[in-house]
Image (spheres, rainbow, N blue to C red):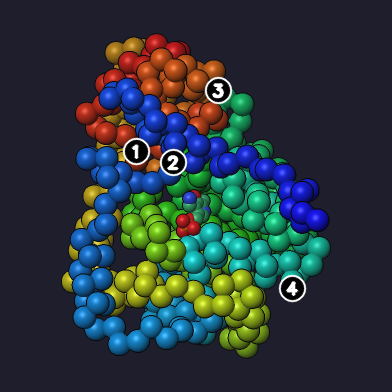
Amino acid sequence: MNHFTKVGRVPGDPILGLMDAYRADPNPAKIDLGVGVYKDARGLTPIPYAVKLAEQHLVDSETTKTYIGGHGDAAFGQLMLNLVLGAGNPLITAGRTGATQTPGGTGALRLAAEFIAANMPGRGVWLSDPTWPIHETIFAGAGIKVAHYPYVDAANRLDVEAMLAALERVPTGDVVLLHACCHNPTGFDLGQDDWQRVLDVVRARELLPLIDFAYQGFGDGLEQDAWSVRLFAEALPELLITSSCSKNFGLYRERTGALIVCAADADKLTDVRSQLAFLARNLWSTPPAHGAAVVATILGDAALKAQWVEELNAMRQRVASLRSGLVEALQPFGLAERFAHIGVQRGMFSYTGLSPEQVARLRAEFSVYMVSTGRANVAGLDASRIGDLAAAIAKVC
Ligand code: PMP
């Protein structure tokens, strides 16, 4: 008997498929706006110098490869709380918050999903429409009912009113996933007034927020991007935050992230953390050490931290200048107003508003690769090609 007879085939990740198609395209003038990684002016995804220095230090000073604990590297956890919540945050001093090291932001989301499924059975999770596709499959995969609240309207504008109206109808106790900044895939972020209004609804409906914080430092700055997270942490007794070091530290493949829990008191935090350690043990036993050791080395050393902040600022400024440069380059075609949102959006991604047909034409006629929803990874653009991209967009509009 063949045991795998009934095993079917699932389609590959469409974004990774796009990457393959780009690689296979012989056109030397091709432009890759597909997969969500930061690229520098040379088209490379760099290892920050601060990371290299920390790694050198680790090679010299590391004494063992024995397992780290279920919550990971304790120094890393403490420094991540400072980074996300702000050093000296009263939740930290009160022992109301703790970080569990996870394999990337994805691992943090998976752990959060398992925690919700095991400890709050029956609660649904509400995702923005659209959201990062893996949100959908992670929560569904943990057996959680997934539902959606609107986020952008048909004219490709952030629709806060529709979002709030939908959240008003979410069943009490359900979980609402919010993107702290640099919304993936749209690039549209809530303003401070919007966040305040979302908080009011979350509080009134007694929802549990799960804030996905995958791009700290890529929006408006390390501290500025944490504004929403800190607002919620201050205002609510309980909160889940998933943090990723993939983009801001350039550590993608080292799988470095954390699930941060804020609980009503130190005792309840200990209960929650015992559950997280138990669940993590079944998922990955203990997390990979290297990336977290790098982050802890950087954040624990004033000079290395300053070096990293400088490099992160340069990445953010490059993306910002690509955004404004593209809008400017569309000006001669009379399209600057139509695409003004690209300059307003934050982070690596832009919902351009291009239709699937226009995206297909860009690929077929100009070797410009982006996701069929019109999501472009602005951070993948080579500044010297902005003019070419603008001309290609003008041709298909
Ligand atoms: N959340 C969002 C919104 C993301 O875009 C990503 C990365 N693409 C992640 C979480 C997970 O990041 P990682 O697992 O690579 O740290």
Task: Give the residue type at disc 2.
Answer: Val
Location of mark 4 (residue):
119
**Quarter holding the C terminus?**
top left
Name which residue lies at 49% across and 84% down: 69
- In the rendered structure, are the residues bearing label 4 and label 2 in contact, judged by CB atoms less than 8 Å apart? no
Task: Give the residue type at disc 1.
Answer: Gly
Q: Nearer the viewer, residue 201 or 60?
A: 60
Location of mark 1 (residue):
380
Would you say 151 lies left or right of 292 here? right
- In the rendered structure, are the residues bearing label 2 and label 1 in contact, judged by CB atoms less than 8 Å apart? yes
Q: CA distance from mark 2 to mark 3?
A: 17 Å
Numbered disc total: 4
User: Measured from the top left, where is residue 294 in percent x and y?
Assistant: 32, 71
Would you say 77 lies left or right of 49 here? right
Earlier along the polypeptide chain: callout 1 or callout 3?
Answer: 3
Earlier along the polypeptide chain: callout 4 or callout 2?
Answer: 2
Q: CA distance from mark 1 to mark 4?
A: 40 Å
In this view, 30 is above or below 65: above
Task: Give the residue type at disc 3.
Answer: Pro
In this view, 49 is above or below 198: below
Q: Between tags 1 and 4, which lies in front?
A: 1
